[in-house]
Image (cartoon, helix red, strand yellow):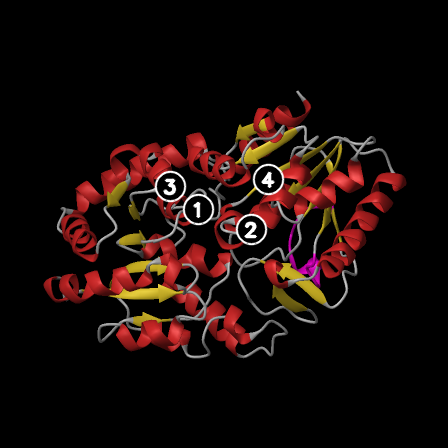
Amino acid sequence: MRLILWHGYLLEGTGSNIYTQHIARAWGRLGHDVVVVCQQLRADQFDLGPRVRVARPDVGPLLPVFVLDRYEGIEARHVADMTEAELDRYTAANVAAIRAELEAAPTDLVLANHAIMGGPVASAACRGRTPFAVKVHGSELEYAIRGRPPLADLARSGLDGAAAVYAGSEHIVSVTEELLGEGAYRAAMRIVPPGVDTDGFAPGRGSLAGLRHLLETEAGRAGAEPAERSADADAAAALAGVGRFVLYFGKLMRQKGVQLLLEAWREVGPRHPDVGLVIVGFGDARAELEAAAPPGTIFTGAMDHEQLQLLVPLAEAVVVPSVLPEAFGMVAAEAASCEVVPIVSDHSGLAEVAAGLGEAGITFDGSGADLARRLDELLGLPAGERARLGTAARAAVVARWSWEGIAQRLLDDALG
């Protein structure tokens, strides 16, 4: 088959960017020809495979986003702050890019990320000629559509006519229906969770020496990406003496609940003096979090997946303390794939991932005190018991969330 995958952003970082990269690669491995329409510059840096091609439409000077980040050569603006004319220009540029691909060769399916702006783009480009599906993510729901009825109307209309509307969890189905209300899209909703790179995030891959080499190489190379999206120049030195540690990796923003982990660690850390705390990520809350962190906490800046795959398997535990709902809980699944037990907030897609991990999925009630209790319990287990839980976690991930299986489900549900 020939498939088009539309994504409004990049192929690196977190969330839907990584989702897009892996779906494209998995479809190629399944024998399909794939065109990814996105805003990634220098896409040849990604090993997407010989059957995947990246096209970058010229969307003009503005990029509608849900969380403000920096992008090279383009101004990110919250979608709610863009005028109707600005959104129309953005939509038209992407519609033209997809239509050019549809005219170039017969296409079996267009899959678009995000109810906004993926729904309006795919609907306008494909109506009457090619089946399309839309993958709804938590970011547009919580950070853009909630509390903004005009954006809810835009999202709902863009989903009409979709062959499938995908949600990563039951939680995202319920939030989508809560915010968008009644509509034809409800009959098309399907639950297909994200996948996990079980080869990359794997036990035994951990290597502090290998990670330090990557970090030192990166620090010595002048990169085009904004500094906040890279590891700190001194990250390798900061990690040089780390022994046992608890890990957080993700955005540094209040919604992700890192402050809860710091609160818990002020209590737990002194009881486990041989265990450190490592915080990986970038975001506007970094300075505030560093100021509040207990002494000895290591902040590294952001890491890419190649770097994380060397770090995560070395952790004693990974904590995902999000305050706001998460669509799925990819960080928890990636940790589990490395045989590292995750401790997650007991809500939304995080709770669903924990349930899928069985006894290896540990939840806390959203308070710093309960997180401290769970950390104490896990760190106090004998090494053999933690290893047993890690093995069970890995087995659950491989069975439920491999990328090839997820990619095939997307096609089966949309095309029958």
Quarter-of-image position of residue 33: top right
* Badge 1 vs badge 2, beta-carbon distance below 8 Å: yes
Q: Secondary structure at mark 1?
A: helix
Specify which label sits upstream in the sequence, 1 or 4.
Answer: 4
- The span picked out in magenta is 39-52
Which residue corresponds to mark 4?
Answer: 135
Amino acid type of the residue tagged 3 in the rendering: Ser
Question: Residue 86 at what x, y percent from top left?
Answer: 73, 61
Q: Quadrant of the N terminus?
A: top right
**Residue of label 1:** 330
> Which mark, by number, is residue 348?
3
123 with respect to 264 (left or right): right
| Rendered view: 378 above or below 308 | above
Secondary structure, mark 3, is helix
Label 3 to label 2: alpha-carbon separation: 20 Å
The answer to which of marks 4 and 2 sits earlier in the sequence is 2
Q: Residue shown at 47%/64% (left/top)?
A: 303
Q: Secondary structure at mark 4?
A: strand
Q: Is residue 30 visible?
A: yes
Mark 3 Cα shell of 10 Å, populated few (<14), some (14-19), many (≥20): many
Looking at this view, name the residue that lies furthest to the left. Answer: 271
- Name the residue: 70% across, 65% down: 62
Residue, disc 2: 18
* Cα–Cα span, label 3 and label 1: 12 Å
Residue in the image at 44% along x and 61% along y: 251
What residue is at 68 percent from the left and 40 percent from the top? 158
Residue count near mark 4 (Cα–Cα under 10 Å), binned few <14, some 14–19, many ≥20:
many
